[in-house]
Image (cartoon, rainbow, N blue to C red):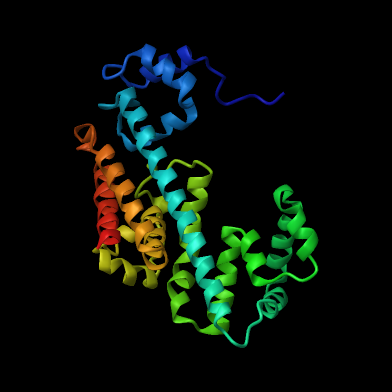
Amino acid sequence: MIANDKPKLTNKEMISHLTTKGITFEKMTEAEAMRILRQNTYFYKITAYRKNFSKTNGQYQGLDFAMLSDLAIIDMRLRYLLLEMSLDYEHAIKTKILDIITYDPNEDGYDIVRRFKTMHSSTYKNTVNDFHRNHYLKDMYKKRQGNIAIWTLLEVMSFGSLSILIDFMWKEKNQKSLKAAHNLHKYAKNIRNASAHSNPLLVNLYSQSTRIKNDQAVVSYASYARISYSQLEEKKINDIFSLIYLHKKYCSNPMIGTRIVHLNELLRRAERHKEWYASIEKLCDFYLTFKKMVDFLAD
């Protein structure tokens, strides 16, 4: 039998454990915290946000359970909104690709798929396998499996595989309209996947583990939003900005307008208890940088 590093705890034992770490229950009672753990979230996720706060002699300083709950709510709303923006962009870039093919007299919609299959056989095979396994698309697969057109391929292609198709078309067509997608889609994919899988975003900000080497293309685009070179060394900043830039570049004005409303609602929600985080420099920096992105989208 393998020994567990951490034993299973009841919710009451979880709360007792947190108190031994210096986490208080003054802004929120233990009974309220118990209800949240049973109905709204779970211990492992909500306690992840404690990493934003400092410790002295193993005790968290100035950290109340209500602050963890508040950050969990803000983070959830951020993830949901970024996922919606990913879906907006995904639809828009697929529409752009089909527009390029439609108005290219040298393309019939089928030959480009054959060329893509030759150049990227593994990606093509994975896409077709997913198509075959999709229970909702069985009729479509039966009709089109032998001769797949670009509009069918796009319909079933994953966000990650779409990155490879964009790069393929960029090299083949040298279409300036695809330049931003060619440069940034791979970064937008990271934040889309993290959001889709409910990975907490407001943790480990500006840590050594999330630092990356700057991509000069991203630095160039981000200069329009007044986001600094050093800020872009934070992977999450780099990836979120990439998605926001792509949304601005490819989505329709009405869709952008809708998301701006939602983003500003999120910013106001994040400020509801801003005094709680005034001394947490990394959270304040992230908020200010994110606000620049929202302002850039609105310009």
User: Which residue is rendered at x = 49% and y = 52% of the image?
Assistant: 192
Res. 110 visible in picture: yes
User: What is the x, y in percent for residue 295?
Assistant: 25, 57
Camera sees residue 57: no
Q: Give the total number of marks visible in the rendering.
A: 0
Left or right? Give the position of 118 relative to 23. Answer: right
In front here: 231 or 137? 137
Quarter in which the C terminus is drawn? bottom left
Q: Residue at x 72, y 57 (%)?
A: 131
Figure check: 108 above or below 269: below
Q: Quadrant of the N terminus?
A: top right
Say above or below: 35 vs 259.
above
State left or right for residue 52 relative to residue 130: left
What's the residue at 54%, 72% (across, down)? Answer: 97
Q: Nearer the viewer, residue 1 or 105?
A: 105
Left or right for 96, reference 118: left
Q: Position of residue 41 (x, y in %)?
A: 47, 27
In front: 216, or 291? Answer: 291
Front-lying residue, 201 or 61: 201
